Image (cartoon, helix red, strand yellow):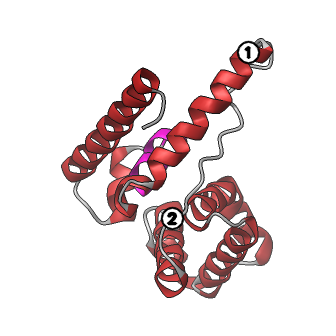
Amino acid sequence: MNQNEFMQLVNPFKDKLFRVAKRLLVSTEEAEDATQEVLVKLWNRNESLDEYKSVEAVAMTMTKNYCLDQLKSKRAGNMKIVHNNFTDREASLQQKVEDSDTWSWVERIMNDLPEQQKLIVQMRDIEEMEFEEMSKVLEMNEQAIRTALSRARKSIREKMIKTHHYGIG
């Protein structure tokens, strides 16, 4: 496979790799480095890529593992939600402030979730990945993923309710 063919293969999911890396590593520079590292590793496996059912799933797994290794070697925690489409462009200033505040609280609450739950929420709710694909990437069965996602969402929901009813969580 030549370089053009390789780029055609990875371009459709390159941004998704970056977003997962960014979610885990927080730093844009570290996420770019992680994405680059994964693409280089894929290129080095260039000849054997045809053996995989889903190169994207392999790349997502590589990205997840690389980022978790980076976190273990440096530090733990500190993920940041970045979701540019949350506020409606036509929304009022007050609505935009409320939306921003809500995302800020969700971000804080997500920072307190276990790493695995953070990653599952990121993959399912932000990246909109299917459970089957998540199962391959996370090397977990689909029911365990559904359970962890349910627990994470319940935790976020309960803390948001507490925050809105009592002011500060």
User: Would residue 86 be seen by someone viewing this image from the given angle?
Assistant: no
Instruction: Report the span colored magenta.
Output: 119-128
Where the N terminus falls, by quadrant? bottom right
- Rendering quarter of residue 157: top left
- The disc at residue 60 is 2
- Rendering quarter of residue 32: bottom right
Label 2 vs label 1: CA separation? 38 Å
Q: Residue at x 40, y 43 (%)?
A: 130
User: Would residue 159 be seen by someone viewing this image from the given angle?
Assistant: yes
**Disc 2 residue type?**
Met
Q: Nearer the viewer, residue 165 or 15?
A: 165
Query: Is 89 placed above or below 57 here?
Result: above
Dot 1 lies on which element? helix
- Rendering quarter of residue 45: bottom right
Label located before the other in sequence (2 or 1): 2
**Disc 1 residue type?**
Gln
Residue 23: image location, x then y, percent: 58, 58
Residue that carries the numbered disc 1 in the rendered image: 94
